Image (tube, rainbow, N blue to C red):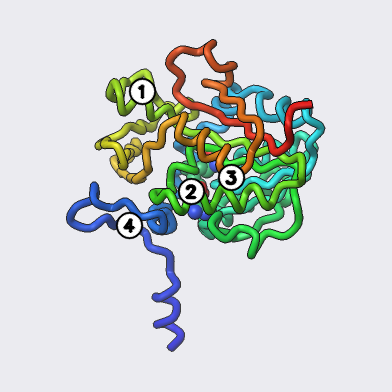
Amino acid sequence: MVSGSRTRFAPKSKQEYGPDPNAVRETDKYQEEYVRGFVQKWDDLIDWDARARSEGRFFIDVLKARGKTSVLDVATGTGFHSIQLLKAGFDVTSADGSAEMLAMAFRNASDRDLVLKTVHADWRWLNKDVHGKFDAIICLGNSFTHLHEEADRRRALAEFYAALKHDGILILDQRNYDTILDDGFSTKHKFYYCGDQVTAEPEYVDESLARFKYSFPDGSEYHLNMCPIRKDYIRGLLRDVGFQQIHTYGDFQEEGEETDPDFFIHIAEKSYAD
Ligand code: SAM
């Protein structure tokens, strides 16, 4: 029945975590978390101009310094990095497991007279849907911490590794969960890319869950249940899947220069140092 199928495929408008939201720790949950209302507000959450200012040319410089031109953005979201890199002249392919996010990214690009090459793909079987090999893969915005099970993290990293050329690089960021787990959340640790009107903070944290709450000026609230993985643990996984060199930056500074960063950015290279 037509109306029945419409209902069946209509995206949910409300997040649902059941009676015990803190018990929801499944990798597959991300698809339901990005409901339409949240996706539409995501760009209120991300103040694109402020974010562009705070990141500066960091990712562009990392890629250019290594002579990389083809980039696969595996966590496109609403398209911020894909669009920045397209504008800077890179050959970008934009993937995401959320069709809602990809549709929004495509619209954001069209509004800027750009066309995104989009692919609907889950990281765990990325190479089933994304074809070809890339100079670089980016997985940004704390996205990787959507993976709740270790097997999924290993599988996703192995898929990223396989989608890279022999000398490819993976750029993956994460919140500084070490500080949140060890010292608790401080208001200093705000998302560096939040708009002024939006607050984003962990509502509940234990060793395998960081439940973030996003509050918007209209009183609406949304959540994301993430896995608070530690910096050295991710570095270990990157090594395990075969990356040979891993550099970790704290808030865009070389390791050690920033003592209590909000975010870590790992740059993992397939090839040995020259
Ligand atoms: N990179 C964007 C940014 O920084 O604004 C988006 C970040 S958003 C926190 C995380 C994105 O990762 C979402 O668009 C979500 O759909 C995607 N994602 C999470 N888990 C995924 C998976 N297993 N496979 C593919 N995409 C996934």
Of mark 1 and mark 4, the one earlier in the sequence is 4
Q: Residues within 10 Å of mark 1 (few under 14, many from 20)?
A: some
Q: Amino acid at mark 3?
A: Val
Q: Is residue 239 visible?
A: yes
Residue 241 numbered tag? 3
Of mark 4 and mark 3, the one earlier in the sequence is 4
Residue that appears at 58% across and 45% down: 241
Q: CA distance from mark 4 to mark 2?
A: 27 Å
Decide: is 106 above or below 193: below
Q: Amino acid at mark 1?
A: Thr
Residue 117, quarter of the rendered image: bottom right
The residue nearer to you, when weighing 91 against 234, is: 234
Residue 199, quarter of the rendered image: top left
Mark 1 or mark 4, whichever is nearer to me: 1
Left or right of 197 in this view: 202: left
Label 2, secondary structure: give it: helix
Label 3, secondary structure: give it: loop
Cβ–Cβ under 8 Å for marks 3 and 1? no
Residue position marked by numbered label 4 in the rendering: 14
Label 1, secondary structure: give it: helix
Decide: is 230 above or below 9: above
Residue position marked by numbered label 1 in the rendering: 179
Of mark 3 and mark 1, the one earlier in the sequence is 1
Mark 2 or mark 3, whichever is nearer to me: 3
Q: CA distance from mark 4 to mark 3?
A: 37 Å
Residue that appears at 32% across and 51% down: 25
Residue position marked by numbered label 2 in the rendering: 153
